[in-house]
Every structure is written in structure tokens, then in C-alpha cells.
Image: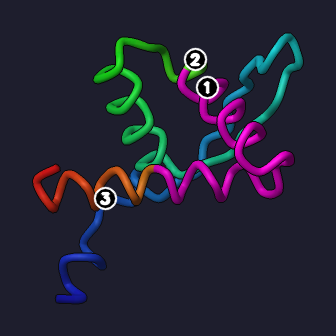
Amino acid sequence: MCEYFVKADPIQYEQRTRTIRIHGVLTSIRLENLHWAVLEEIAGRDGMTVAQLIERLYDELVADRGAVGNFSSFLRVCALRYENLIAQGR
């Protein structure tokens, strides 16, 4: 099983920083390429750009929690939860 993970393309776990505008404020977000790819898939599925998806997730997080802690980690978890739903066939 570990071989599957070890043989992952190193490009997938390289980090890339994107600057996204959230309500007019430029914000830099650093994620691994694989997470960016999953966010792009989610955004495309919903007819949005990645920037629009991230702004929407930010807004919904603030509405639900009142504050945003580690937003990059939140986005990583969103990507993993999406992949988990896909794996479950939902």
C-alpha cells in the first residue's frame, strides 16, 4: 500500500502560491498542486472559477463560524472531503 503513495508524482505535492482577491482584498494562499487540482475540479463542476469558489467557501465559513482560522488548512480539508465523497460514489 505505501508504494502507491511513495510513487506519487512529486509535482503533486509541490506547493504553489496563488494570490486571490476576497472581497477586494488580495490574499496569498499556498497549497500543494494536488489540492489546487481538486479545488479546480470542484469549481468547474459548479460553474465557477477557483477564485469564486474560494470566496464562496470563505463567506460560508465566516457565516457558520464567525471567524476564519487557518484558511489554507480548511481548503486542504475541503479538497480531501470532496475526494472522499467521490470515492463513496456521492
Question: Who comes first in sequence, dot 3 or dot 2?
Answer: 3
Q: Residue at x 32, y 31 (%)?
A: 41
Q: Are marks 1 and 2 in contact (CB under 8 Å)?
A: yes
Q: Residue at x 67, y 30 (%)?
A: 18
- Report the Cα–Cα distance between label 3 and label 2: 28 Å
Residue 13 position (above or below residue 7): above
Which amino acid type is shown beneath numbered disc 3? Answer: Asp
Answer with left or right where residue 55 lies relative to residue 53.
right
Determine if the magenta segment contains residue 70: yes
Which amino acid type is shown beneath numbered disc 1? Answer: Arg
Residue 36 position (above or below residue 54): below
Which amino acid type is shown beneath numbered disc 2? Answer: Gln
Magenta: main secondary structure: helix
In the image shown, does 29 or 79 lie closer to the viewer?
Answer: 79
Q: Quadrant of residue 28?
A: top right
| Residue depth check, mark 3 versus mark 2: number of the one nearer the observer | 2
Q: Residue at x 54, y 25 (%)?
A: 53
In the image shown, does 4 or 50 lie closer to the viewer?
Answer: 50
Residue at which label 3 appears: 9
Q: Quadrant of residue 4?
A: bottom left
Residue 6: % across, % down: 30, 79
Residue at which label 1 appears: 56
Residue 50: % across, % down: 51, 23
Q: Residue at x 52, y 59 (%)?
A: 77
Residue at which label 2 appears: 52
- Within 10 Å of the Cα at label 3, are there few (<14), some (14-19), or many (20+) other Cα atoms? few
Q: Secondary structure at mark 2?
A: helix
